[in-house]
Image (cartoon, helix red, strand yellow):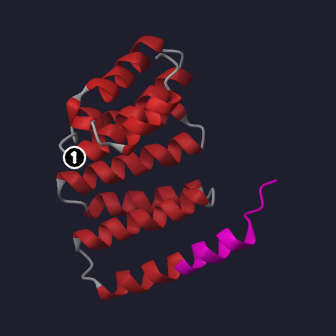
Amino acid sequence: ENEIPEAFARASAEAKAALDTFLQALPAKSKYAVKARVAQSELQIAAKDYDGAMKILLEASKEASDRDTKAIIYNAKGVCLFEKADVKAARWEFLWVDVVYNQSKAEHAKALYYLAKCFDQLNDQEKAQECRELLLNDRAFTNSEWRARAQKENKTP
């Protein structure tokens, strides 16, 4: 039941090796190095190694200096916690992006998508609907993949 298919494991190992090589070629404080670490954490999340992913993200957050990178890290931490079923903690990570690091429309849309899901699971339908409506109706999110996902999942016409 918890086994990772062999093809996924092989592809994940190849991606990890490529990221490791890429990281070694970059200066330690490079914003690309931080983003590559986030990609590493996403591989860990996909493999359900939530503690390993969070460790990488906490290290990356110490080095992040620009607002876009911070938004990416907060969202990745939120996804990690959401997948781990720690919805209350995930909510706070996504709220950071919604309230403070919302300058990137792509990251803001992702945060709103997951906030709606978090609030649904926390039985706060009013806040869930608020997030969902903002994502679905704000013109800033017109071409967002997260809006498209929410539209597919939205039960109202």
Which of 1/59 is in front? 1
Point out the residue furthest to the right here. 1
Residue at 39 percent across and 68 percent down: it is 37
- The quarter of the displayed image where residue 147 is located: top left
Instruction: Classify mark 1: helix, strand or loop.
Output: loop
Assess whether residue 121 is covered by the magenta stretch.
no
Q: Is residue 93 left or right of residue 66?
A: right
Residue 91 in sight in this render: no
The residue stretch that appears in magenta? 1-14
Residue at 43 percent across and 78 percent down: it is 19
Task: Estimate the x, y position of residue 88 in percent, counting from the top left.
Answer: 49, 30
Task: Estimate the x, y position of residue 99 in percent, counting from the top left.
Answer: 24, 32
Q: Residues within 10 Å of mark 1 (few under 14, many from 20)?
A: some
Q: Is residue 19 left or right of residue 130?
A: right
**Mark 1 sits on what residue?**
104
Q: How many marks?
A: 1
Q: Is residue 27 left or right of residue 76?
A: left
72 up-or-down from 130: above or below: below
Task: Estimate the x, y position of residue 81 in percent, counting from the top left.
Answer: 52, 43
Main SS of the magenta segment? Answer: helix
Assess whether residue 10 is covered by the magenta stretch.
yes
Point out the residue furthest to the front here. 157
Q: What's the amino acid at mark 1?
A: Ser
Residue at 48 percent across and 55 percent down: it is 54
Task: Estimate the x, y position of residue 71 in percent, counting from the top left.
Answer: 28, 48
Residue 12 in sight in this render: yes
Which of 18/84 is in front? 18
- The quarter of the displayed image where residue 140 is located: top left
Q: Is residue 152 left or right of residue 75?
A: right
